[in-house]
Amino acid sequence: MQLGELMPKLKVSLLTGRTIDQGTGRERGKFSEEYERSVAVCQMDPDDVRLLGVRENDIVRVSTDFGSVILRVAKSARNPHPGVIFIPYGPWASLIVDPETHGTGMPSLKGLPAEVEPAPEGSLLSLPELLRKHFKKG
Amino acid sequence: MDIAISNGRIVEKVDERKAEVIDASGMVVMAGGVDIHSHIAGSEVNAGRLLRPEDHRKDVEVKTAITRSGVGYSIPSTFTTGYRYSRMGYTTVMNPSMPPLEARHTHEELNDTPMIDKASYPLLGDWWFVLEYLRDGLIEECAAHVAWMMRATKGYAIKIVNPGGPESWGFGGNVESIDDPVPYFNITPRDIIRGLCKVNRLLNLPHTIHVHTNNLGKPGNYITTLETMRCVEDLATEGKPAIHITHCQFSAFKGSDWRTMKSGAEDIAKYVNSHNHVTLDMGQVVFTDTTTMTADGPFQYRLYGLTGNKWVNHDVETETCAGIVPFRYSRRSSVHATQWSIGLELALLIKDPWKIYLTTDHPNGAPFTKYPQVISWLMSRVARKKVIKRISRRARRNSLLPNIDREYDFYETAIVTRAGEAKALGLKQKGHLGVGANADLAIYNVNPRLVDPSKEYGTIRKAFSRAAYTIKSGEIVVKDGEIVRPVQGRTFWVDIKLSSPMEPTEELRWKFRKYWTVEFENYPIPEDHLTASVPITVEARI
Amino acid sequence: MPAVSHVPCPVCGDFCDDIEVTVEDNVVTDVKNACAVGAARFLNFAGHRQMKPLIRKNGELVEVSLDEAIRRSAEILADAAYPILYGWSSTSCEATRVGLELAEEVGGVIDNTSTICHGPSILSIQDIGISSCTLGQLRHRADLVFYWGSNPWSAHPRHIERYTMFSEGRFRQSAWEKYLSSLGGILTRKRLQRAVNLLLGRRLSSPPEVEQGLPYTMFQKKRKMVVVDVRRTRTAEAADYFLQVKPNNDYELLQALRMLIRDEELDVDEVAGVPVELLEEVADVMIGCELGILFFGLGLTMSEGKHRNIDAALSLVRDLNQYTKFLIMPMRGHFNVTGANVVFTWQTGYPFAVDFSRGFPRYNPGETSVIDILCREESDAALVIASDPVAHFPKTAAQSLVRSPLIVIDPEPTPTSFMADVVIPSAFVGIEAEGTAYRMDHVPLPLKKIVEPAKTCLSDVEILQRILHEVRKMRGGP
Amino acid sequence: MITLTAKQTFKVPIEAECISPNAFAEKSLVEICALPVWEGNRKRILSELFKIEQKQKTSKNSTIRISGDVGKVRRIGTRMSSGEIVIKGDAGMHLGEEMNGGTISVTGNVGSWVGCMMRKGTIEIMGNASHYVGAAYRGSARGMRGGTITIHGNAGNEVGCFMMKGLINIYANVGRFVGIHMKNGTILVRGNSEGRVGAGMLGGKIVLCGYVPSILPTFTIDDVRPSVKVNGEEVQGPFYRFLGDLAEKGDGKLFVSKKQNTHLKAYERFL
């Protein structure tokens, strides 16, 4: 039996949106430390964090039908919202959201079924690394 | 006879060997058309555009080497608006409802509306400053602030819409008569109309107050309209007009409900024929699918109730409001058909063409592109009969039209589509072909000697739809109904000179901070924001 | 030192125009009245800039002259059979006007960022209509404020203070002290402290206001606030009612409310995780108010149902006008996304997703909207201005975007410019360049120029005009 | 009989409303070849994009056969009023838009807005259809006004949006908002639905033989029926019958299979 199966997985509903930190972060420049810290993060309900057996700032992998991405864990200040995770808009969130617009022009960016799992082996990519990896350009 | 044109004006004569000559023999030559009331630009019009993609889809303008693309039908995009007016031989259009707070928007759109000269009327009838100053009887203070507002918004005339209504609509209410007090302000529509009429005189504005009456669109409202005209009778001086009742058709309903609704045109015409302080425009209805939009919020909500169509409402803080509802006028509906009849009855029963002007209150009664059809009705009994045959039986029974034989001749037509408007607006260089006038001309390919408008109304309609030539400020801009040269067109506004120019007082700033959510310094529109600004200076009496 | 006052803040849809900025030899040294994000914009905009035009040559972005960058851009657009011109929400209306002319000239598809924020709201406005207003109307009159799927405290930090709960108007009192007293417990007080800092911890200007005792205010009841969201947001904590809706169930909740305000029975005891009793109470509050306003955000436009969620919200508000005065307003994100819609609409008749490929404007989101075009791999070139689609579009769309030639006009480096083939640095509109922009409630305000841009950074307007001119030259036009 | 074969796989959208029996009628091959089409912003003639063969002079009742990759060719059969179009493979958006008669059949899948605002005629799709089957144009409240659309595969969201009349017959599954704002007409879905069936419907009939996650709270149960008649054919149930959408004061009828939706049992207490 494989290590992966020992790892707890959490089925959640993924929300993306604006945060004040992301707002101020982007004002420091899209390639700044602050921006990276403010958007490469997965905000979770404290109980979910415990359930997953990780701590704040640990590394997790969030996966949807459309891809998966490595993020830093943060306990969300405002809870409870068990089973709901929040990732601020940005290059990280965009890698795993649903492009389907259902003929409206608007992709599906909120309330997406997703899976969170600890990824001790994973490492947070810097923005340029992330972009090169996924877009083979730049 | 010859008409000589030199750098944008009509002159005595020019050197024919050097001049470009247009042979207009066998054609009708008129001054460029002037529209006194047509919603062509601003937040309200644009909200209507946004609301109706289905209206645009069926009527598009393709880009050419010299013209921009766009869409119609009832609320054309800005470029298309300019082109279509120009093709009909119109060179001046008045944009009648400008929310002061959003005036910057109106002027941005006018900058993108080519081919025609234009101006806008700021909505001042429910502005808190006006309500408070008039309530306290401070006419001169009121006038000073109106002067400031005209300059700040680059406005041309005082527009009053359902006085007191928009303020009451702030909490979902309305005023029911011209003596119905406005909640929280203890002032009546009568006070507002009389007050602003006095202000208008103090400021020597070129146009009178421009009034959309209370109770518009309600059966029985012709009474309100008569009262509104009467209430400023004593304020008229040396037989000059003191009030303009706009799109009068919508304010000339008799009857106690929709079932008994009839025409009140006769009574209104009788009054207007015996008084000289009033001018009107028709607000003619044409049977088509159009979009209604006014600053009369409560009326538009009622219209939503009647039709169940999609409804837009937009309240503007401390100033006014607006509403929009798509609307289809059907000849089978007795109400719609009666409305159609009322507009023409007014135009035909009012003897003096200098007192009533041709409008459809674009787009409320119909898109302005229907003017040629309205002209053909004014000029031909046969054309009118043809429609009467096909309208609702009830409306036909009540219509006065079958007994009206009057047919406009070309002179009367020229008056109700240009000369009269220009006079009412105080635009001295427009509406005529005298020496010194703006060289704005329309040449229509119809020979008055050979064509009998009464029978050949089809020819008339075609001719007025596609001008043979439109000349704007001395340049040929339209030939055979097609744009041959795009021009910008100017924007007029009144620059009111007070004996003691009003300095923004601490009180004004204080009120500003309280009344609006924008900074005082960001409110006025700098003149350079207008691409072709033409201030008209007037000396106020204060 | 020269302080520029009444500066509109070119960041969010609130577009506050009371900012005071201190400039010392062309550098912003101090900002007053702005929120955290606004202050950051004014203080940091100069820090991270791309100063020289770039063109990608064998895989690498290399510095080139502006003329070369303009010429290359023009070539790319002129050669394209189906180019995209995207962005427009963080630049001036003047720039958008030129952009539309350029799109028409090259027969492209022009779209603005509302396509991924309030596009769905616009779609349903076109089906239902909307009962709305300017923000001052609410400051003066609103006694019931809904925030549905929007969190102003994070996205529009000064909204509550300037326009709703904590503002004071002719008929309404500020709800400040009620808010203070309504909170108990150390934890909440801590949170409150953070909230207060966020609101008032800013450096404030404006001298104490001189009361003139004018017959002005006629206070009536205070305001109530209702928050509907999937998370207990910071805004939710200040609310009189908080409805925590199950993710993707807003539509059911809204439709149920439409029945409840008509006093009709539901066959169910719970809707979207909210007990019907509570909904009935809220429905009564809605009918009972004098003027209600429902602000909605991306929580509604992006979750399942998209424009149909807005259908329900717009219809609910429309229905409520039978009983009282009720208004609704989308919380727009970028400071000029409303302006982009406005200019698009007056020039083409349509607010976004406009296709000029056949020489006249056509509009059909889902067909002519940029995400769909990219996902179908239909475009063969793109110009992106003042926007960062690579960071904010779903992966497949972004990949398709960078696959064909990409022109980026932006004052600062972004993930999108990082992927571009031509990069043209521009002046920061509203700081280094003037213009016009529209607040979320359609109130137009001037954008101000408070510092001189670098010689190499032209305004968006100039850059676009030069590209347009170049395109026309290539086509032998005037 | 006339056959069109796409010369290549297209990248940018092709606009070809000229591909319809009405447009081809009484035209020689040469004239047909010269008909205008749009490839992105480039104006082309039909023969640049298609290989065209004509058996005899086409009348407005003749058949057009299309093969090759026309998945990006839009507006085929727009406003056609007679004749037949047979497409081998996939077809692009707006197939048979505002169609007024005749028949269109497609062996593959079709894009969104198939049969948008159609009045008469029949459209049959062997594969899947995308969103807005038989819908209205943006801002208009007048969708499909007659005729029949049959889809043997799945359909996307908002099938029959603002539908006014006619029949939409879907053999597999549908997305959300089937029959949104529909005023009249019939929609028969033999597969499952993703939910929000009949949202905002004012009238008409929706029959759902498969599973639905939930019924909107603004519908009320009214009866259980053993079977439903859909244009002559008895569809066997039993079905729960709901009325709605009460949020719109609508009186549309929504039939939902009882067997496939045991989780709706709770509603029976109201019967």
Image (cartoon, rainbow, N blue to C red):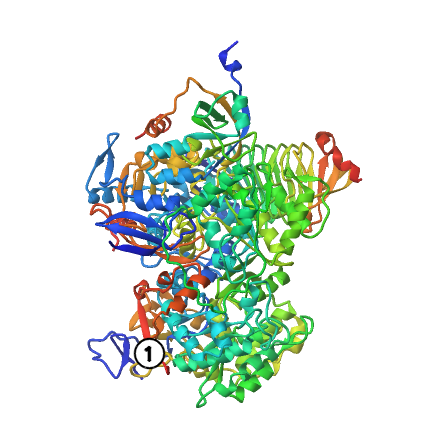
Instruction: Where is residue D154? Give x, y as percent.
Output: 59, 33
Residue closer to the observer: A65 or B469 = A65
What is the quadrant of the N terminus of chain B in the image?
bottom left
Q: Is residue D122 above or below residue D213?
A: below
Q: Is residue B81 above or below residue D19?
A: below
Q: How many marks?
A: 1
Residue closer to the observer: D212 or C49 = C49
Instruction: Where is residue B237? Give x, y as percent.
Output: 45, 88
For label 1, count other residues whose C-alpha is less than 10 Å away and answer few (under 14), some (14-19) or many (20+).
Answer: few
Residue closer to the observer: B362 or D96 = B362
Instruction: Where is residue B65? Give x, y as percent.
Output: 32, 56
Residue picked out by circle 1:
B500
Report whether B73 appears left or right of B480.
right
For residue C143, which quarter of the picture?
Answer: bottom right
What is the quadrant of the C terminus of chain B in the image?
bottom left
For label 1, the SS is loop
- Badge 1 amino acid: Ser
* Residue at (47, 73) in percent of width and height: B130
Q: Is residue D149 visible?
A: yes
Chain ID, mark 1: B
